[in-house]
Amino acid sequence: MSEKKLTIAEDVIRRSVEQFPTPFHLYDEKAIRDNARELIKAFSWNKGFKEYFAVKATPNPVIVKMLKDEGFGADCSSLPEMVLANRVGIKGEDIMFTSNDTPAEEFKKARELGAIINLDDIKHFDYLAKHAGLPDLICFRYNPGPLKEGNVIIGHPEEAKYGLTYDQLFEAYRMAKASGIKRFGLHTMVASNELNPSYFFETAELLFDLVIKIWKEVGITFEFVNLGGGIGIPYRPGEAPLSWKVLSVGIQEKYEQIIKANGHPDLKIFLESGRAITGPYGYLVARVLHIKDTYKKYAGLDASMHNLMRPAMYGAYHHITVIGKQHLPHNVMYDVTGSLCENNDKFAIDRLLPELEPGDIVVIHDTGAHGHAMGFNYNAKLRSAEILLRPDGSLVQIRRAETIDDYFATVSFEQANSFQ
Ligand SMILES: *Cc1c(COP(=O)(O)O)cnc(C)c1O
């Protein structure tokens, strides 16, 4: 049961709850940096390889800066994410702007920053030209539709709102070429939290085949292929991580067989992984507030789904470790809940855990990506702090918790009090 280990030592977690009020997200800097280095090393065969960290996964400037220093760019889906990336020193084409249903001012910002623009629809080409002007490098997002199976988080590609169809892609690159654009990229993102490496080899094959086809039919060469994010992490005990090395070797094989064998010029491989970069190296640290016995046994925490939405939103599994009780029998079945007035505010349902008491420190695993980031204010819940464990063992607050004043910052009591 406890084969899923914490990357952060137990005494550090005890120290963290003495230093900071629970709940908070706790990230492990050394583990994130080591992981980033391993990824870059694994793809060193590909000249120009770049990982654009999906900012939405962990939009904390300290984390994004840390990854920049490791050589990553930033994959941004909105104007504030681009501003965040830019403010920590990620510049120009080290920013990839992958958006959908995009407002004009976001395209303008992307142009102003010199970001790579990845278009989600064929009509966005004219929209971009009209509102922000055309860049000299353009990328389109491909949606393979029924040619590729999806999964539960992202859905089936033909049901997904993202990207261009196969036929539209050819038309789009023809249009771009006719407008004088000289530099091209191709993107897709068809999986989410996928642990099977074959899935990514097939995606690479799909895109490499397309590169060759478009090259021959439209007469343009490509600078890069962006294989998207969606690389999974082992949330459940017993699941194996997808190693960067295995991923890289399989993609390289397809590259040799398709890109090299057909004589297309060198192509840069881009990834825009979020979850697999930071996910396993963050934890939601909380305490048991109440134990309740009714038709079921409930362990109520001082955290709620506004701190971590994945279990409620996707029925996602997040492993739970109870500090100091790891070695006790896990023989009591709990629903582990928060305090929201929503019955799906549960971190776990029917989970076997050691006997819990109020005050127990509960660590919820794998919250380093799509954890704090998906937080919200429903029920007037305030978002928690984010704490970073530095390699020297010190704990640094990299985002404070929200206050009631933050919550009220956008409303006007003056108006309410003068309202007739
Ligand atoms: C969400 C997203 C990512 C990152 O996904 P992960 O599952 O965190 O790897 C990358 N690219 C796009 C376009 C996305 O929407």
Image (cartoon, helix red, strand yellow):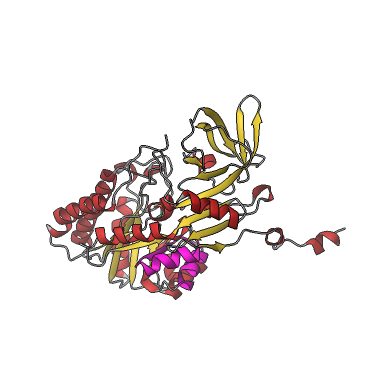
> Is residue 83 located in the magenta-colored stretch of the structure?
yes
Residue sitting nearer the eye, 173 or 63: 63
At a point 32% along the width and 66% down the height, the residue shown is 176
Q: Position of residue 83 (x, y in %)?
A: 50, 69
Above or below for 2 versus 60:
above
- Check the picture and name the quadrant holding the N terminus: top left
Residue sitting nearer the eye, 188 or 286: 286
Above or below for 224 versus 13:
below
- Check the picture and name the quadrant holding the C terminus: bottom right
Position of residue 207 in the picture relative to residue 8 (left or right): left
Q: Position of residue 62 (x, y in %)?
A: 48, 66
Position of residue 129 in the picture relative to residue 250 (left or right): right
Which secondary structure class fits the magenta region best?
helix
At a point 49% along the width and 41% down the height, the residue shown is 321
> Is residue 4 located in the magenta-colored stretch of the structure?
no
Above or below for 331 versus 124:
above
Residue sitting nearer the eye, 334 or 381: 334
Q: Is residue 171 visible?
A: no
- Magenta range is 60-88
Q: Position of residue 210 (x, y in %)?
A: 24, 54
At a point 14% along the width and 53% down the height, the residue shown is 257
Q: Is residue 350 visible?
A: yes
Q: Residue furthest right?
A: 420
Question: In the rendered picture of this protein, how many numbered marks are placed on residues?
Answer: 0
Q: Position of residue 208 (x, y in %)?
A: 22, 55
Residue sitting nearer the eye, 48 or 321: 321
